[in-house]
Amino acid sequence: MLALPLDAGGGYPLQMKHSVESTVRIIGSPVWSDADDICALRDNERHLGHIIQANGWQAFDATKLNEAGDNYRYIGGFRGKREAKDAVETSVGRSARPLVMTAN
């Protein structure tokens, strides 16, 4: 296994041709943090969505705004926790990519 030193931002510095430097940051795969009445989907840097138990399970996509542009996008209400989580994961979709390139 190759061990690379991390830069101050938590990324791996890469030396490119012509002395151009970039940083690859591995954010990680999304994971759920669970409590009794709220669950949040996140990666190492972002809140991606959540579900709240209130009249069933209410699901929200934190990567998109609602129509008014003032809150998270409401996905809908679901009977079960698993169905609500599946809806958040489907809605978040490509927003949860695990690899980001940033230029210094």
Image (cartoon, rainbow, N blue to C red):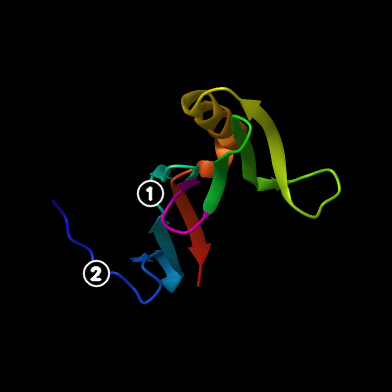
Task: Quickly name the residue at label 1.
Answer: 28
| Residue occupying image coordinates x 59% and y 29% | 56
Q: Quadrant of residue 18?
A: bottom left
**Horizontal and vertical percent for residue 87?**
58, 28
Q: Is residue 75 magenta?
A: no
In the image, residue 53 sits, relative to residue 90, either above or below, namely below
Q: Considering depth in this image, is 54 or 19 the residue closer to the camera? A: 54
What amino acid is labelled 1 in the image? Answer: Gly
Q: Which residue is mark 2?
A: 5
Q: x%, y% of residue 60?
A: 64, 41
Question: Mark 1 or mark 2, which is nearer the start of the sequence?
Answer: 2
* Residue in view at x 34 percent, y 73 percent: 7
Local crowd size for mark 2, using a 10 Å CA cut-off: few (<14), some (14–19), many (≥20)? few
Q: For the residue labelled by badge 1, is the local secondary structure a helix, a strand or a loop?
A: loop
Residue 41: in magenta span? yes
Picture coordinates of residue 61, whole percent (x, y): 63, 41
Question: With respect to residue 25, does 77 lie above or below?
Answer: above
The residue at the point 57 percent across, 22 percent down is: 79
Tag 2: amino acid: Pro
**Residue placed furthest toward the front:** 55
- The residue range painted magenta reads 40-46
